[in-house]
Every structure is written in C-alpha cells, then in structure tokens.
Image (tube, helix red, strand yellow):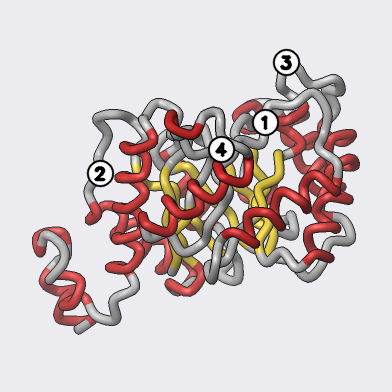
Amino acid sequence: MFSTLLGPLPPDPDRADSASDERVRSTLGDLQAAGLELLTDGEAVGPAAVPPSPDEVVDRWRRAASLAAARPVKAVVPGPYSASRSPIARDSSPAAWAEALQPSIAALAGAGCPFVEIDEPDALAIAVVGSEARRFVDAHRRLTDGIDGVHLSLALTGGNLDAAGPATFFDLPYASFAFDLIAGPDNWRLIAATPADRGIVCGALSPLPRGDMSREVLVWAAHYAASTNGRGLERVGLANASSLAGLSRREALARLAIVAEAARIAAEPSAEQQVRRLDPRAIPRSTRRRRS
C-alpha cells in the first residue's frame, strides 16, 4: 500500500524563477512532508514538439533521485498516444513517438530507476474508435518492446476508458495501471477485470476546488481494488485524480496529505484500527467483526 502523485504539482509562486535543482528539491521536500511514499519531481512532461532524448530523461530522474534522500522516486515519461495528439507535436504518429521514447525507458532501466510511469492523459478516443484503440496498442507494444528490469506503470487519466475493453490494456506488459476514478468512474469496470498479478493505483481524490476530500472514500477505494481478483493491498496504491492544475500549490499539497493519510489507514491490519481514525459509519459492523 503506497501513495503517490499523478500529474504535475502546481508550481510554487515563490520559486517560479528558481534554478531547476532548487525547484525540484523544494517539490520533493513538499511531497515528503505531505507523506507520499513514492515521489516524483512534480514537473510536467508535456506537451512537447519532439520526444525528449534518453539523456534528458535519465538526467531528470537522476537529479530528483539524488535530492530525495531515502524515499523512492519514479520517472514519468509522456505516453506516445497522448503526446502524438498534442497540437505542437511535429509527428502525429503514436508509433513514431513510441519508437523514439523506447530508448529512454531502456536507459532508465539501465540506470537503476525502480518505477517508470507512462502518462496517457489524452486517450479517450480509444474508447470510441476501434482504429484508435489499435494505434494505442501498437504504440505501447513498441514502447515496451525489450524492456526488462523495471516496474512499468501505465497512467490513464481524463475520463472513462472501459469501453476500449480490458484486452486493450491488460494484454500489454505493464506491471501496474493508474486509473482516474473521478473523471472516469466507469474505470472501476477495468479494475475489476485487471489480472491479480498487476498493481492498481486508484486516482480517487477529486482535483476540483470543491471536490470530495474524505479519507473514507479513499480507504474504501483501496480495499475494493485490493479485493478484485484477490489482488491484495500490497498491489494497490492511492493517488489524486489528475489534474491538480485548478488548485493552488498549497491546496494541492493538502489534498495529497489526505491521500497519504488514507493510504496509511487502509494499510492498518484490522478494521477496528481503521475505525479509530475514520468515521465508524463508513465501515459496516459485519466487516469490523470479520476483519478484527
């Protein structure tokens, strides 16, 4: 059970003109203070005209990892499908983006990066157009071809993708999947179909200024995801439902602190221990007796 950030963190207005190392150090410190276990540099990965080079990708991760003290840091790489759809992209072919990005993934694995997240925030077309789903699958097969020795995670945000069908995602060699469950509540259908040996990151905290911020919903989401196909909490994480762009940095960090606290509560070994930290009405009495 862990917590993490999906998408970029809103910028710190006090450090807008800071050098990149200082800015990243500040972000990592803020994310650690919020209680997240799996960190990121919090910087946006797109849109971009051309794919970043392997050296750029590895240097960015190494810089963040060197500044993060003891906690693990994931690398975030643009997804080839969403990247190709950007109006500033020079190449609109997902396959071409995938082939250009694959060496970066391989380089991260070779550098010892423990966790690589592929960010696909603009993939809704694959849920309604069969040819787009095929382009998506082809791109991700090219992207992951020959990659070994690193945890690959596919982050799917922005809306409901369940109509694309489970095979669109789970026939790909990703170790885990992050789903946006606020903009895409029907993604629960995909979670229910996710093979038991794959991890799930529940993007279950609203990014809206007046959205629900209850820990109880997050704890429920973690346990429901853990129950699907006997997955277990060891293959479940919690996150915000991106994007946090509509919030100030202070508001975003407050939301992430709730995510981190909910992950710790969800990992408590018994429902009785959870009840002490939650509204007891959120946990049925029968469940409390069974799990205590």
Q: In terms of image quadrants, where is residue 216?
A: bottom left
Please state which of the two labelled residues, at mark 4 or mark 1, is closer to the viewer.
1
Residue beneath the point at 66% across and 36% down:
45
Q: Residue at x 78, y 53 (%)?
A: 58
Question: Which residue carries the number 2 mark?
Answer: 213
Kindly check if marks 2 and 3 are in contact, taking CB atoms under 8 A apart as contact: no
Task: Measure how far apart labels 1 and 3 are at the Cα level.
Answer: 11 Å
The spot of residue 15 in percent (x, y) is 49, 34
Separation of marks 2 and 3 at Cα, in angstroms? 34 Å
Of pointers 2 and 1, the one earlier in the residue sequence: 1
Read off the residue under disc 3.
Answer: 87
Q: Measured from the top left, where is residue 106 in percent x and y?
A: 85, 58
Q: In the picture provided, is 74 more to the left or to the right than 215?
A: right
Identify the residue at horizontal 30%, vertical 61% (top origin): 261
User: Dot 2: within a 10 Å radius of its alpha carbon, few (fewer than 14), some, or many (20 or more) residues?
Assistant: some
Identify the secondary structure beneath mark 4: loop
- Examine the image and state in which quarter residue 47 appears: top right
Count up the numbered dots. 4
Q: Which residue is mark 4?
A: 161
Q: Secondary structure at mark 3?
A: loop
Q: CA distance from mark 3 to mark 4?
A: 22 Å
Q: Looking at the image, which is closer to me, 98 or 32? A: 32
Q: Is residue 120 above or below residue 111?
A: above
First in sequence, mark 3 or 4: give its number.
3
